[in-house]
Image (spheres, coloured by chain):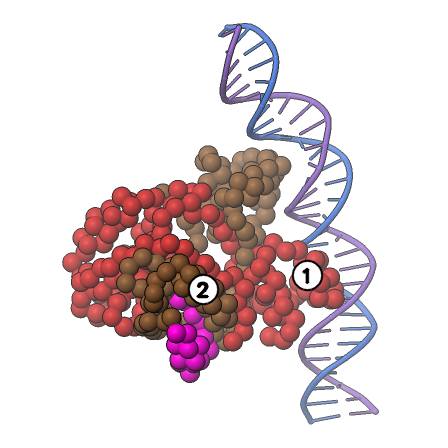
Chain colours: A red, B brown, C purple, D blue
Amino acid sequence: MDELDSALVRMLQEDGRRTNRDMAQALGIAPSTCLERIRSLRERGVLTGFHAEADLAAIGRGLQAMIAVRVRPPTRAVIEAFQAFLEQMPEVISLFVLTGNDDFLVHVAVRDTDHLHAVVLDKMTKRPELADVRTSVIYGHTRKRVIGPA
Amino acid sequence: MDELDSALVRMLQEDGRRTNRDMAQALGIAPSTCLERIRSLRERGVLTGFHAEADLAAIGRGLQAMIAVRVRPPTRAVIEAFQAFLEQMPEVISLFVLTGNDDFLVHVAVRDTDHLHAVVLDKMTKRPELADVRTSVIYGHTRKRVIGPA
DNA sequence: CTACTTTCCGAACCTAATTCGGATTCTACG
DNA sequence: CGTAGAATCCGAATTAGGTTCGGAAAGTAG
């Protein structure tokens, strides 16, 4: 994990399709060396994958919300079962398991407010272990793509 | 946005480096057609980009937390200034602007608990507009990569 | 100093991306 | 229906990039 590795990770976080040759030239190394470095980063688990990002509004999921959830009792069995239930819901795009007052933060992307209402009332509150729900609409969400070492 | 487009978006969300030829063959279309479809998806803003994902623990940011923040007064000027302040912090990897009790949810990735403590006490609470902070450590975070239409 | 290991390079080869002219299908309108 | 126009799709040719591999160079340990 030297300077070269960090630079490659940064470049690929920015643009996952940047060509090997291009990066090699930018760093002043041979393409074969660059390729070997990236292979190694993958094997060591530093780079976990490459993914395209789609615009949520463009695929009819223009409304996002964060739903804070508390379950009772907060045992491992209940937590894990509820987590599996949440992850399987198509509206859920991201899920945080937390310490503190709430057990989960559920990040959902839905069509509109009716859809959001349905998700909370028809799906989540149907579960008996659910003790408390608080829904917040998301005005904006920014995600950092380039994350350097601490 | 027909069936072909959806399939391509799904494939690229799963693996952003899947080759054009491979996808074309999987869908039973010519590589040139496939390429043209993807170009169009990009131009229409459906596909917004390709990014590599790095393992946070591998780059020394193994601890994540969610920080709920309330600012006073909740005017546009104060909100926007605080948002800009948060986004510029290297520890912040994702930021939600919300309705409800809290104004922000700040997703941070840090080295350890000391680092987390420093972020909250030395950086955030220095700001006078900050009215309330609640920090929750994140046990686990799963993110869905393949997101279909509503 | 020497043997060993690791990293790197560059040329050759192979596979994929990209372009483009023409064929085909779809659509609107008479 | 029939036809003009537009949009889509295809396949072959070209260009560019990915990948391999033997050997050079540099670093390391004893």
Residue B31 location (% of width, % of height)? 61, 38
Q: What is the span of residues highlighted in magenta in the rendered image?
A: B106-128
Output the chain of dot 1.
Answer: A
Residue drawn at (36%, 71%) of the image: B130
Q: Residues within 10 Å of mark 2 (few under 14, many from 20)?
A: few
Q: Residue furthest left?
A: A128
**Label 2 sits on residue:** B81
**Label 1 sits on residue:** A23
Q: Choose between A60 and B102: the one closer to the eye.
A: B102
Quadrant for residue D6, please give it.
top right
Output the chain of dot 2.
Answer: B
Quadrant for residue B125, please give it.
bottom left
The kind of secondary structure element at disc 2 is helix
For residue B27, above or below residue B99: above
Quadrant for residue B140, please give it.
bottom left
For residue D21, above or below residue A1: above
Q: Choose between B68 and A57: the one closer to the eye.
A: B68
Looking at the rendered structure, the kind of residue marked 2 is Ala
Q: Does the magenta portion include B114?
A: yes
